[in-house]
Image (cartoon, rainbow, N blue to C red):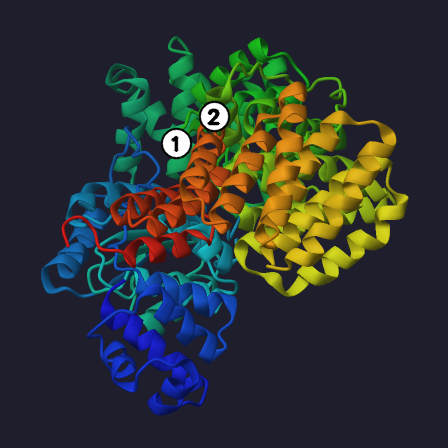
Amino acid sequence: MDKGTFGRLLRRARQRSLLTIEGLAEASGVSGRAISDMERGHSLPRQSTLAELMDALGLDEDERSSLVRAASRRAPQAVVPRQLPPDLAQFRGRDAALATVHDLTDRVTGQGGHVVISAIGGMAGVGKTTLAVRWAHQVADRFPDGQLYVNLRGFEASEHPLDPGEALGGFLRALGVPSGDIPSGVDRRGALFRELTADRRLIAVLDNAKDPEQVAPLLPTSPGCLTIVTSRNQLSGLVAVEGAASINLDVWGQDEALAALTARIGEERCREEPEAAAELVALCGFLPLAVAVVGAQLSSEPRMPLRLAVRELRRTRPRLDALATDDLRVDVRTVFSWSYRALTAGTARFFRYVSLHPGPAVSAEAAATLAGVELTPARRHLRELTAASLLSRDADGRYVLHDLVRAYGGELADQEDDDRLGAQARLLDYLRHNAHTANRHVSQLDPEPEEQPLDGVVHVVLADRDEALHWFRQEESAVGPAVLSLDDPRLLRLRGNCAREWIGYNEVVGRWSEEIGTARVGLEAGLALDDPVATVRSRSNLTRALLETGHTEEVEASIDAMLADLHRLPPEVRARIECEIGFFRIRQGRFTEALLHPRRALEIYRGIGRPDGIASTLSNVGWVLAHLGEYEAAIATCEEALPLLRQVGDRRFEAGAWDAIGRAQQGLGRLDAAITGYRTALRLFEELLDDYNRAGVLDHLASAQLEQGEEAQARANWVCAAELLTALRVRDAAQMWAKAESLPSRAD
């Protein structure tokens, strides 16, 4: 952000509060001249000054976050998104369309004009996405600030159209905005998106749009941006309102279709049977997707005469309803069914099950689980389906179904009376079971109860943290659609169990916005099944996510509901929830209440003889005492906890105890002892790869170093804390940047 941006935000906030500059000066204690300089973009406030202004203005969490971010003197780290799908190697034809779009690109880059393009006008499979991606790749070097891409799912039978707010959330994260700083609501997200792209030159590809209303909030407004929209609708509203240039794609001409077929099966075969080749592409209706499928099938059968392929294609009935026309030459289901009938029986069954996957891409392990087969034969089926062009692969090696192919496979699954419910149950349990395994290497939280996976669920061997994180990243685009959209009531328990397992990963990488949605599913399941343990644990996960994202409106009601259910919980779970509620009270700054809950937990653990619980809860109590100013009691409590923590091997809470000792020693003015405590805690958290708590200790260490006059070291530690929290997409990152920038750098 720059000074001008901060000034505009401050002026708007003051005007909304109905204050004059003089009124704000009186309410905040900041001079009117200083406020005037800030609003005119001449200066930025120090951290203490900013806090006084925000308190006087009575801002909500989103407004405070925006001002803190804008006031940072640190130049935002340049994040250049690279979201384009891979270009198609066998791209053929479309010379006229490419000439047109390159002319439009010249207008953007040459005259600084913003152009929105609708590459539309044809049936599904006509090549709209392929053209958009080819175009974007060809001109990417002229847009140095990166490329954004989103599939808006406007015309996918198994998906609801993507909400513009969700699409904006993905764009904002790709542009480097921490999850906790992403505001709620389409309007606020859109405003932030336009603000971040106001001076950028980038490409945005909005693929498979439903209507102009879905697209409008996603349009960058910078003169240096190129936006490409694809849709099966004409989107005439974009043309009329946004001045979009409309490009209507039809099917290929005969020469283009023959060139594409030749690229796939070889020039010699087409030259030997030119009439059959011409009739093949005609039977495909010159539709690019259909030609690709036929070409892939023929390339896998190099000895098959083209005339035989023509005869087979003529006989295939019926049609794909979504594309039914009176012209049999554009019968896409005919093309798909011909390719499908050529599959081996096992692969045909496998294809039907893979098409039931609700996410945008499917891993080999998830595909095997859906079909209930071992991984080795699954990989063989996937190779056969990829060779037949019924599947493609994305940049991460996962398998992608075109939406028409997905719809066709789903129809077949219903016709064959396949076990759709069983496949969906296995998928949910695959995502739960392997998340449980991965959490042994990743999560800092107490594990969910062990549960045997369903028959047919693929177990992924994960040897270390890197492999566990790789698995989570591979499946994170699937877990949301699976948990949120597989809504058969018989799957509710599995959805809830899956949702609760993913909190460990979501915490580690800062997927707090995503956690809100999945935690609500877990809560719904717990309530519906009258399972108090599942209900309270899901409420706890939801409360944590709400606090981390600054959406605090529901927090108090959620905590009250947890307290009301405590009497229904087993002692161990009741003690754990008491500690978690204590943590939430700490986040709210309500330390007196925060002390009550771990003390209750301590009584429970002592009553049931749980030394590990006693040790960790003593550490919690000491930490709260330090924040309440009861420094000697805090030190004594933590020193009681330390040998117990070492005895049970709980290094995480041992680190927390040293952090609390540091806080207490600092409060007593013993800065050397405080720094020793903080550094011990920091070493332990580093060994545990716990970046969230590591950032907290760095914050505390920096404050002690500042008291000692070591400004350079304090600033360096606040910068490090800010970088860790930024990577975790935690809203507290803005506070760390503000603290760091309140101190002079070495160059100042």
* Residue 523 placement, left or right of 304: right
Dot 2 falls on a residue whose secondary structure is helix
Marker disc for residue 541:
none
Q: Nearer the viewer, residue 311 or 738?
A: 738
Marker disc for residue 470:
2
Q: Mark 1 or 2, which is nearer the eye?
A: 2
Marker disc for residue 291:
1
Mark 1: amino acid: Val
Residue 402 is situated, as x and y percent measured from the top left of the image, at 48, 37
Mark 2: amino acid: His
In the rendered view, tell whether residue 346 sits above or below residue 25.
Answer: above
* Residue 637 placement, left or right of 526: left
Residue 373 is situated, as x and y percent measured from the top left of the image, at 65, 14
Dot 1 falls on a residue whose secondary structure is helix
Distance CA(mark 1)–CA(mark 2)? 36 Å
* Image quadrant occupied by the N terminus: bottom left
| Quarter occupied by residue 415 | top right
In the rendered view, tell whether residue 33 sits above or below residue 504.
Answer: below
Residue at image point 49% right, 28% down: 684
| Quarter occupied by residue 720 | top left
Residue 565 is situated, as x and y percent measured from the top left of the image, at 85, 50
